[in-house]
Image: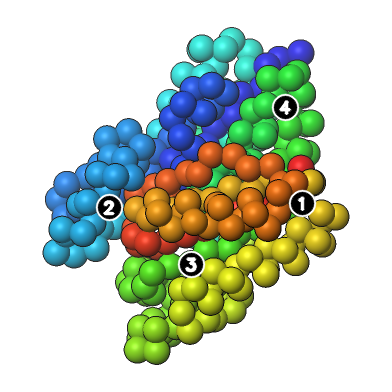
Amino acid sequence: MAQVRIVVDSTADIPADIRERYRIGMVPLKVNFGQESYEDSVTIYPDMFYEKLAAAPELPTTSQPSPAEFVREYERIREETPGAQIVSIHLAAVLSGTYQSAVMAKSLMEEPGVIETIDSCSASYGIGVLAVEAAKAAEAGASLEEVVELVKRLRENQRIYFLVDTLEYLHKGGRIGKASALIGSLLNIKPILTLDENGTVSTVDKARSYKKAVARVLELAEQEITRHGGSDRMKLFVGHGAAPEQAAEMEAMLKERFPSAQFNATVKIGPVIGTYTGPGTIAVFLEKM
C-alpha cells in the first residue's frame, strides 16, 4: 500500500515541531507590509509579525500561493517518499483562493489521481488538527480513502469560538461590515465569533465585556461538548494572537470545567490569520475524537 502524506498551507498554524514529527508538508501564504513580502511560517513567524503589526502605518495584506508552488511541494514529497499519495487540506475556500490553487495544482500533476484536495471549511488550528489527525492515521497505515473519510468526518464534528480584541482588523480585511465594527468599538461590545459549516465568519453572540464574553464561550463549549456525548470524547485546543496570558487563563478555565477532555499544546495564531483577527485574539477549538 502506498504511503499517504499530508500537505497544508501555512494558515493551519501547526507548530514546526509537530509538522516535522508527522512529516506534514506546508505551502506558505505571503504577508505583505508595504513593499516588503514575507512567507508565512518561513520568513515571518507570529512574534515577529505582531511586533511589525504594532509598528506598521498601514495594515498588511496577504496573498495566496500559486498553483506552481503547490506543484513544487507535491513533487518534493513524491521525491522524498516515492509512490506517496497526498491528502492536501486547506483554508476555507470562502476565505481565500488557496484551496483553488491546490485544486489547479493537482490538475497539473502527471498523476493527479494520487492527490486528494480538501476544503477544511476552517482556519488556523481548525485546519491544523484535521491535518495532524490525518497524519497520525496515515502513519498507522490508513489508505488514501480512509484518510480522506477521516478528515471529512472530523470536519463535520469541529467547532471554533473566538474573541477578537477589536473588530478593526476584520473590518479592514473585508470580513465584517463597517457599521458593525463602529458600533462594537463605541459600545465596547465583544462579539463571540465562529466559522459556519462553509468557513464563513459569523457572530454567535455578543457580550458587554471581555469577562462576560469568556464566560459565554465556556457556556457554548459546554453545549457543544454535551451534544457530542461528554468531555471525555473531546479534544480542546486554545489559540492566541500575541495574548499568552489570556490564553493561559482560558486553558485553565477549560481544564477546570472539562477535566475529562483531552488538551493539547496552546498554539499561536499565525501571520496570515492574524492579519484579519489582530492581536489579543483568543480562540477555542473543539474536536470530537
**Label 4: which secondary element:** helix
Kindly identify the residue that appears in the image at 40 percent across and 54 percent down.
Answer: 245
Q: Residue tagged by mark 4?
A: 137
Query: Measured from the top left, where is residue 196 in percent x and y?
Result: 63, 66
**Label 2: which secondary element:** helix
Type of amino acid under label 3 = Leu
**Label 3 crowd (10 A; few <14 / some 14-19 / many >=20):** many
Q: Indicate which disc, 3 or 2, sits on the residue closer to the N terminus.
A: 2
Q: Comparing marks 1 and 3, which lies closer to the viewer?
A: 1
Query: Measured from the top left, where is residue 238 in percent x and y?
Result: 54, 51
Q: Residue tagged by mark 3?
A: 163
Q: Indicate which disc, 1 or 2, sits on the residue closer to the N terminus.
A: 2
**Label 4 crowd (10 A; few <14 / some 14-19 / many >=20):** some
Q: Residue tagged by mark 2?
A: 50
Q: Indicate which disc, 4 or 1, sits on the residue closer to the N terminus.
A: 4
Q: What is the spatial separation of the Cα atoms under label 1 and label 2, in whole angstroms?
A: 33 Å
